[in-house]
Amino acid sequence: MDDIVLTPEPEQKSYWRLIWAVIFVILMISGVILLVFFEIIGAFIYIVPVIVPLLFVLYWIPLYYSSMKFAITGEHVIVEKGVWWKRETTIPFERITNVDKTQGPFERYYKIGKIHVQTAGAGGTEAAEAVIQGIKNRDEVKEEIKDRIRTQKGASISKADENELLSKILVEIKALRMDLKGG
């Protein structure tokens, strides 16, 4: 199977900007109330610390967006992201226990969503979760991952075959021991 490399849709940036715009508007309402009931200095002291992080977020969104890359290979799901602190999550298909798709109301507006790929006990120290976000074709990506999981598990040795193989190995080891004792 060919590797599939995905990047988030451009709407992902718009989605993040919308989320931050809502947060900014809520914070600015408090600044306007301060301006009405107090003096300009009080409102200025409040508004400047709100505007500076907003400007940073507007600078950060394109950088973070361009750092995101998702790959579905023959054996793994790989998620790479990060501007200063790069993070790569690699999950082998044989460890995947759950594949979910989610879409919040703002994501629905932009026709994008997320795929969550989880291993047993996601959230624990030995578990992993990879999130493929900002994609439009969530159903197709989810089915592709599930198909590759089925293919991978079908290619692995069955328990009965494993037991038979272990029995044959045991017989060979016993025969070698007998040869070594007799020789």
Image (cartoon, rainbow, N blue to C red):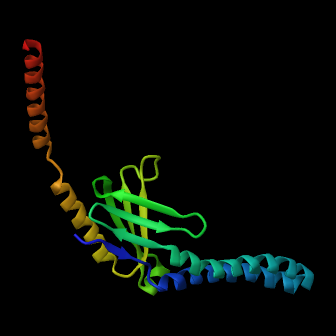
**Residue 36 in the image, given as x and y percentages of width and height:** 86, 86
81 vs 113, nearest the viewer:
81
Q: Is residue 19 visible?
A: no
Q: Is residue 148 above or below residue 50?
A: above
Q: Quadrant of the N terminus?
A: bottom left
Q: Nearer the viewer, residue 65 or 31?
A: 65
Looking at the picture, how far across and down is residue 144, in whole percent?
Answer: 26, 71
Quadrant for the C terminus in the image: top left
Q: Quadrant of residue 181?
A: top left
Residue 120: x percent and y percent?
A: 36, 50
Q: In the picture shown, does residue 7 fall above or below 110?
A: above
Q: Is residue 66 above or below residue 101?
A: below
Image coords of residue 8 (percent x, y): 44, 79
Kindly tell me whether residue 108 is visible in this rendering. Answer: yes
Residue at 18%, 61% in the rendered image = 151
Residue at 14% x, 47% y is: 158
